Amino acid sequence: MPATLDYGVALDNTMGAMFIGVLISGVLHGICLLQAFFYFTNYRNDHWLLKSMVGTTILFDAIHLCFVSHSMYHYLVSNWGDENELKRLVWSVLMEALLTGLNAGIVQAFYAFRVWTLSKRNWFLTITILVFIFAEAGCGVAWVAISMGFETYTDLLRINPLTITINALSTAVDVFIAVSMCWLLHGSRTGFRRSDTIITNLMIFVVNTGMLTSLCAIASLTSLVASPRTLIYATFYFCIGRFYTNSFLATLNARKTISSAANTEVSSSGGGVMMSLPGARSGMSGTGSKGRTPQDITIRIETTKSAMDDRNEARKTPLV
C-alpha cells in the first residue's frame, strides 16, 4: 500500500478522494439550506431554542464547507504541482473536524432529548447516551488539538487509533439512539390496528433518518481501518456533518406530514380516543395564538371495544 502522498504516487486515493468529498458536501449543503427554508417557513411557532439549534447547525455546516473548499484550493490551485506542499497539513483540513464534531454533538443531544421524553424521563438511558456523546466530543477536541501540532499527513498516522475511536463512537451513538427510540415506540403499542400502524411508521422514519448518517460513519471507519495510509475515508468523513444536519431538519420538517397521515387515519375511523405525540416538549416547542402546538401529532386510536377499554388503553400509551 503506498504511503500517504508520497512522491510520484497518483492522487486518486488522496486529494482525489478529498475532492469528491467536497463535491458531495456542497450538494448536501444545498439540501440543508432548502430544508432550513422549509422549516423556518412552516414552523414559525417553534421555541427559540429549537430555532437557534437549526440556525447553529446550518452556520457550522456552511463554515465546514468553506474550510474543506479552502483546503482543496490550497492544494490544487495555489500550490498546484508542488509535491512538497501536498504532503504538508493545512490548518483548514484539521479545523473542519471540529465543525463536524460540533454538529454531530448538537444533533445527537437533540435525539437524546427525544429519547428522554419518549422514555418518560428515563435518566439512566438518557445519561448513557450523553456519556457516549461527551466521549465522542472529547476525543474530537483532543484530535484537533493534537493534530494542530503536526506538519505532514504521515504524522496523522500516529493518532490513527484516536481517529478510529471517534468514528466508532459516532457510529455507536447513532445506532444506540435509533435502537432506543424504536424499542420505546414498540413498547407504546396499544394493540389497536390504526395506532399501531402509525407507531410502526414512526419507527421506520426513525431508522431511515439515522441510516444515512450511520452508513456514512461506518464507511468512513471501514476505509480508515482498511486503508489508513490513504485519504479515502475523507470522502465519507467530509459528508458526515451534512448528514447529521439533514437528518435533524428532516425530523423537524416531517412533523406536519406525520400529523397529516394521522389525521387521515382519524377521518377514516368513526370515534375513538386521541393520543398526542408531540414533536418536542418541555420548552422545546412554541405555542400558537390559541395555545395549541401545531407540530404535535395526534392519533385517534381505532376502537372496537367498550369505551372503558379505550380509556384504559389510552392511559397506557406514553407520549413521544
Image: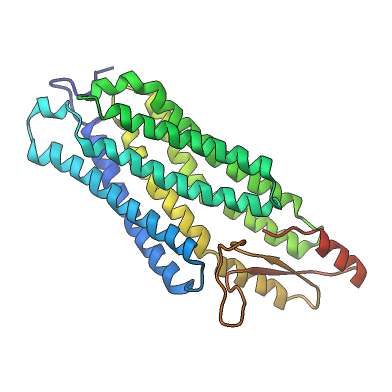
Q: Position of residue 282 (x, y in %)?
A: 62, 61
Front-most of 170 and 133?
133
Q: Is residue 35 left or right of residue 74?
A: right
Q: Position of residue 103 (x, y in %)?
A: 41, 47
Above or below, 168 against 98 in this view is: above
User: On the rendered image, what quadrant is the N terminus found in?
Assistant: top left
Above or below, 39 against 246 in this view is: below
Residue that appears at 14% across and 39% down: 74
Residue that appears at 34% across and 51% down: 60
Q: Which colour scheme is used?
A: rainbow
Task: Name which quarter of the figure residue 88 lies in.
Answer: top left
Residue that appears at 70% across and 52% down: 185
Front-most of 126 and 220?
126
Above or below, 198 against 274 in this view is: above
Task: Name which quarter of the figure residue 175 lies in.
Answer: top right
Camera sees residue 299: yes
Q: Which residue lies furthest to the bottom in this view?
A: 290
Q: Position of residue 48 (x, y in %)?
A: 47, 66
Front-most of 145 and 203?
145
Q: Is residue 24 left or right of residue 257?
A: left
User: On the rendered image, what quadrant is the C terminus found in?
Assistant: bottom right
Residue that appears at 34% across and 40% down: 98
